[in-house]
Image: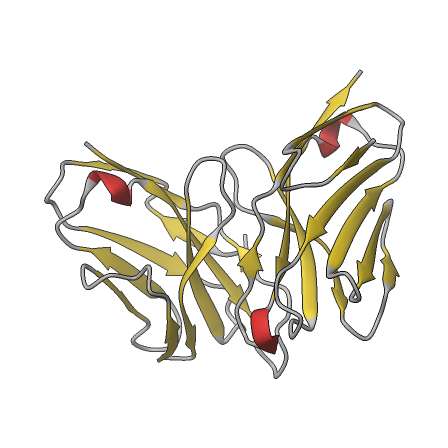
């Protein structure tokens, strides 16, 4: 399978714990995006990378959230001191990013439940 | 069947009928629009896109119409099938930037 892959698919954690999600984009894609989706809502933009550079971050991305893409390939999203409000689906997407915005290819998401 | 998207989040149609899902976008500077389909428990899946220099684009059984004057986007699905049942999201790139902003979505239910 050469699509966007995310790991883990499901994560249940207790409030206050740290969690990390990994995203492997489509190999030739240089843009990588993180979105968050809660039940019944559309995906909300969190951040995106062009290669290894983090070019934009949403105000939704509090200090407890950090994302990295160290070698311009896979990315990690870490949430520290999780809160119940962090419970959501975390979606990763990638795109070719040649100039104009194009189609974002989404992974199946990592569902986080904070107890 | 026809839906105003944000105001009627559920659209029910009979199998074989045409579906129209509507979306009002917010940013007049957006120059790229895209429709995604999302099935339960899965990530959004691309359906069709359109750039602001066009007002209509057709795919296989789907057509997207763009009216920039009233900032309105619609998705038409011909001969709707049970497999089309899903939530449909429109998205725009606000200000012509490199990220997509999604609408709330419309649940399409296809009745046999």
Residue A94, position in %: x, y?
51, 65
Q: Residue at x 33, y 78 (%)?
A: A71
Residue B82 appears left or right of A83: right
Quadrant of the rendered image containing residue B13: top right
Examine the rendering and report whether any part of residue A2 can be seen: no
- Name the spot of residue A60 as percent of width and height, x first: 33, 59
Q: Nearer the viewer, residue A60 or B43?
A: A60
Task: Decide if residue A10 is on the left or right side of residue A31.
Answer: left
Q: Name the residue at 29% across, 59% down.
A: A77
Question: Could you say where residue B71 lies in the image, as x and y percent from the top left?
Answer: 73, 61
User: Can residue A43 be seen?
Assistant: yes
Residue B20 lies, with reference to residue B51, above or below; the image says above
Q: Quadrant of residue A23?
A: bottom left
Please determine whether, in this image, residue A10 is positioned above or below residue B112: below
- Picture layout, residue A10 above or below residue A78: above
Placement of the C terminus of chain A among the 4 image quadrants: top left
The residue lying toward the viewer, choosing from A67 and A72, is: A67
Camera-side residue of B18 and A52: B18
Nearer to us in this view, A1 or A59: A59
Image location (x, y in percent) of residue B19: 82, 36
């Amino acid at each position: 399978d050469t699509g966007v892959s995310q790991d883990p698919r499901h994560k249940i954690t207790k409030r206050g714990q740290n969690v990390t999600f990994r995203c492997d984009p489509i190999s030739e894609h240089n843009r990588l995006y993180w979105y968050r989706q809660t039940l019944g809502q559309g995906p909300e933009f969190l951040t995106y990378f062009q290669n290894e550079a983090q070019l934009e971050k949403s105000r939704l991305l509090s200090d407890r959230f950090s994302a990295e893409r160290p070698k311009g390939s896979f990315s990690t999203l870490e949430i520290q001191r999780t809160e119940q409000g962090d419970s959501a689906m975390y979606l990763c997407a990638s795109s070719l990013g040649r100039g104009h915005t194009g189609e974002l290819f989404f992974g199946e998401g990592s569902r986080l439940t904070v107890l | 069947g026809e839906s105003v998207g944000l105001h009627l989040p559920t659209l029910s149609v009979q199998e074989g009928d045409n579906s129209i899902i509507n979306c009002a976008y917010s940013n007049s500077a957006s120059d790229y629009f895209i429709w995604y389909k999302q099935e339960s428990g899965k990530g959004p899946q691309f359906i069709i896109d359109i750039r602001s220099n066009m007002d209509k684009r057709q795919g296989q059984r789907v057509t997207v119409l763009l009216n920039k004057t009233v900032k309105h986007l619609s998705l038409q699905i011909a001969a709707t099938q049970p497999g089309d049942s899903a939530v449909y999201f429109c998205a725009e790139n606000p200000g012509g930037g490199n990220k997509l902003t999604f609408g709330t979505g419309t649940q399409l239910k296809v009745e046999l």
